[in-house]
Image: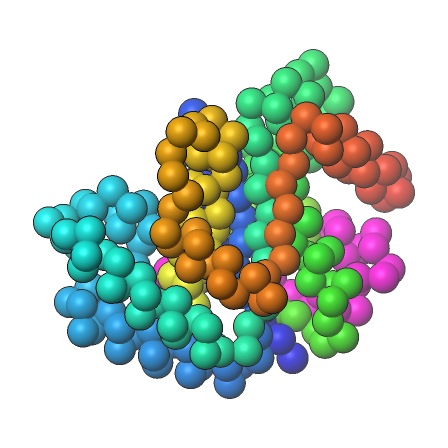
Amino acid sequence: MLYAFFDESGIHEGAKILAVGGWVATQDEFETLASHWNTVLRRAGVKVFHFVDFNHSIREFEGWTPRWKEEFLKDMFDVLGRRQLMGVSGAIVMDDFKQVIAGGSGTVLHEKHGPYWVCLQYCVEAISKRVNDEVIYVLDRQQEFDSPLRESYLTLKEVSADYAPKMRGITFEPKTKFPQLQAADLLVGETAKSLQNRLYDRSRPIRKSFLALLEMREKLVGGYFDKTGIPDLLAKAQQSAASLQ
């Protein structure tokens, strides 16, 4: 049995990049990760890691110097680097997404949770291609999305004979309760921010935190969708809907 702890970034209005991602591992690996993660938090005097707060030096991270932040991140990545994990992330360029689906076709992609589901489906399929075990997906709780995402997950399981045996279930939990979801927040937040810089602000230097993430590249699987890839996703969603009729 494997677990996939996933978080999201960019579901707010006006976001340029929406990303979903996290880590896949056994229960034992995640229990050890949670213990070490909490140790790093306690040493730093932090209760819960939130990427947005950390990135903007607000709330628990207000007043932190660049050096403090760099040392804190190093400790976080050390925790991740010592564990047997697979990191998976999917991202979508929202301007392109809105342009492609303009006009509407009645598929799930036109619902409010559609972009989230596109990225999550990519991750589920990427994991299912690479593991032989059943996987339980644990997502950070977002009340307005929990129910439709569960329905979309069950639909994918129903229409995907190849993946269904590995899709054990899906649940939604608060980040405050599971450090594993905080680790997912770090991965997906860094993915979204670095992709946004790459596409919209190339003058910015590559983020040190992204370079630290790339040092674990052998553990990572990821991709993003722009105007060249989104039409294929739309066609796939239409096929899935037709198969249930």
Against 137, residue 26 (above or below) is below
Q: Residue at x 31, y 61 (%)?
A: 73
Q: Quadrant of residue 175?
A: bottom left
Against 96, residue 23 (above or below) is below
What's the image's color scheme?
rainbow
Residue 10 shown in magenta: no
Toward the left, the furthest residue is 63
Instruction: Left or right? Give the position of 25 relative to 184.
Output: right
Q: Which residue is drawn at 47% across and 51% down?
A: 188
Q: Which residue is drawn at 82% across and 42% down?
A: 240
Instruction: Left or right? Give the position of 158 relative to 112.
Output: right
Q: In which quarter of the image is residue 182?
A: bottom left
Viewer-nearest residue: 102 or 129: 129
Rendered location of residue 234, percent (x, y): 76, 31
Toward the top, the furthest residue is 103
Rendered location of residue 12, percent (x, y): 42, 33
Magenta part of the chain: 154-178
Q: Which residue is drawn at 69% across and 21% down?
A: 100
Against 155, residue 103 (above or below) is above
Q: Is residue 142 in sight in this rendering?
A: no
In this figure, what is the number of numbered marks? Answer: 0
Rendered location of residue 89, percent (x, y): 57, 52
Rendered location of residue 209, percent (x, y): 38, 54
